[in-house]
Image (cartoon, coloured by chain):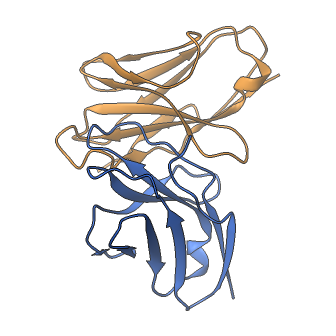
Chain colours: A orange, B blue
Amino acid sequence: DAGVTQSPTHLIKTRGQQVTLRCSPKSGHDTVSWYQQALGQGPQFIFQYYEEEERQRGNFPDRFSGHQFPNYSSELNVNALLLGDSALYLCASRPTSGILDTQYFGPGTRLTVL
Amino acid sequence: DAKTTQPPSMDCAEGRAANLPCNHSTISGNEYVYWYRQIHSQGPQYIIHGLKNNETNEMASLIITEDRKSSTLILPHATLRDTAVYYCIVSGREGGKLIFGQGTELSVKP
């Protein structure tokens, strides 16, 4: 049983560009959350998707957007990249019917903005 | 802001018990205490959770004080592979939004 998978593992972009990160949840999970983790900090919640809709959102600007597909996989899009967007982006999934915050995390995508 | 307070770092000798404290003095009656850990360059890993009773699983034990204002995660026989940042998180039943603090960096030494 595959866990949460993310692609790509590493990515280098320049300021002003746009990026799309992808996540496949653990089998049987229908809720996906995204987190940003800057170096030396704990992960920060970006948003959560369930039934293809954004359900909760953290304190992130509109440059951060997402999408969830019918197969529960998800994308995180970041527009107009800033140097400060350099971070590890983590995807987490959980079943809606389970213990609500037992989340399973993927290995992350390391984004570097130059 | 995180609702929990943890020491920034701790050391533990290999084979000994590691006891990681967490203060959550503003916890509400319907909020759970969750523990996750993050080994370097990996995603966080769920360890254990509890409401008010002590809990134990194959990874660790969780001791919650009677007033629920603090808890302790116990790794009974720490190994080098337990070296990681440990996060204590308080979350309500609506779930989905984990608020991570700085965590405790545990170093297990031979």
Rendering quarter of residue A28: top left
A16 relative to A105 in the view: left or right? right
Give the answer, above or below, for where A18 lies relative to A48: above
Give the answer, above or below, for where B101 lies relative to B23: above
Front position in the image: A22 or A58: A58
Q: Position of residue A44 (x, y in %)?
A: 56, 36
Task: Find the residue positioned furthest to the left.
Answer: A97
| Residue under the point 51% across and 63% down | B23
Q: Position of residue B74 (x, y in %)?
A: 46, 79
Give the answer, above or below, for where A42 lies relative to A60: below
Q: Position of residue A41 (x, y in %)?
A: 67, 45
Front position in the image: B9 or A95: B9
Front position in the image: A3 or A84: A84
| Residue under the point 59% across and 62% down | B6
Task: Find the residue positioned furthest to the bottom.
Answer: B15
Q: How many marks?
A: 0
Q: Position of residue B30 (x, y in %)?
A: 26, 49
User: Which quadrant holds the C terminus of chain A?
Assistant: top right
A40 relative to A58 in the view: left or right? right
Rendering quarter of residue B47: bottom left
| Residue under the point 71% across and 9% down | A17
